[in-house]
Amino acid sequence: MKNSKLIFPISTLVLAIFISLFPLLVKIRPHISTQNINWGLSIAIAQDLRPEAVAEEVYKIIPSLPRENQYLSQETGEVDLDNTLISRLVRYHEYVKNRPLKYRLDWKLTLADYFGVNEPIRDLRYPGSTTLQLNPLEGDRAIITSLSRRQRNELVDTLVSIYNGEQPNSSTSNSSTSEEQPPSNNSNPIPNLPQPGDAELLLP
């Protein structure tokens, strides 16, 4: 009998504390849930994006990049619009070379492959070689090697941002642009000579 009398005041006290804290919990919980949902979505998108979806995101951020999607499908005989330069680049990086998706150096190694200064690209293993009527490797290599250093850095930074679930940093292009500005009178007067094979691709 004494125990039952003791339990009743304790349960009442707990209920009173919960009621007093309820308004605070209501205010805090949506904020925490939204953060968790946004973080979870970013992780899911970064992990589950198909190369074609990644390519579309890249083209939205860097619309000046050539699509190179004029190739005919072997199966339908029609132009495969989803088979773009960037989707093939991503497929080569992810499926052919099996390289990590979240690090700049790995993407620079992939670009170096196109320049012929890292690992050779095999024609028969290149994305599109078995699905398109014409192997796009030579055309893709010509486009990639024609990009400026600023454009290559912007492409790498964009890909890394997408796979890390981050918003691409617009300051990247601004800082990269400054690399191409002519040196001032106070800078080193000795010009930077181009290196064979553009080995600067391998720099972090």
Image: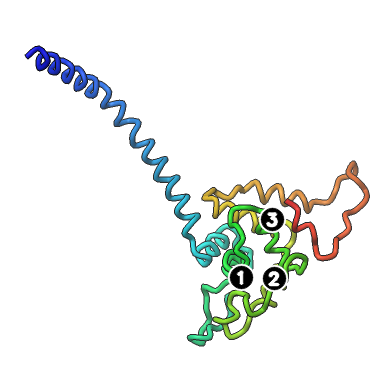
Q: Any mark on residue 40, and which?
A: none
Residue type at tag 2: Ile
Q: Earlier in the sequence, mark 3 or mark 1?
A: 1
How far is the residue under mark 3 from the one under mark 2? Answer: 15 Å
- Residues 125 and 48: in front is 125
How far is the residue under mark 1 from the one under mark 2? Answer: 9 Å
- Element marked by disc 2: helix
Q: Exactly how many numbered labels are in the figure?
A: 3
Residue in the image at 66% along x and 57% along y: 106
Q: Which residue is mark 2?
A: 143
Q: Which residue is mark 1?
A: 85
Residue in the image at 66% along x and 55% along y: 154
**Mark 3 nearby-residue class (10 Å; few <14, some 14–19, many ≥20):** many
Colour scheme of the picture: rainbow
The residue furthest right is 190
Vertically, is 76 above or below 126? below
How far is the residue under mark 3 from the one under mark 1? Answer: 16 Å
Q: Earlier in the sequence, mark 3 or mark 2?
A: 2
**Mark 2 nearby-residue class (10 Å; few <14, some 14–19, many ≥20):** some
- Element marked by disc 1: helix
Q: Residue 88, image x and y in percent?
A: 59, 70
Q: Which residue is mark 3?
A: 153
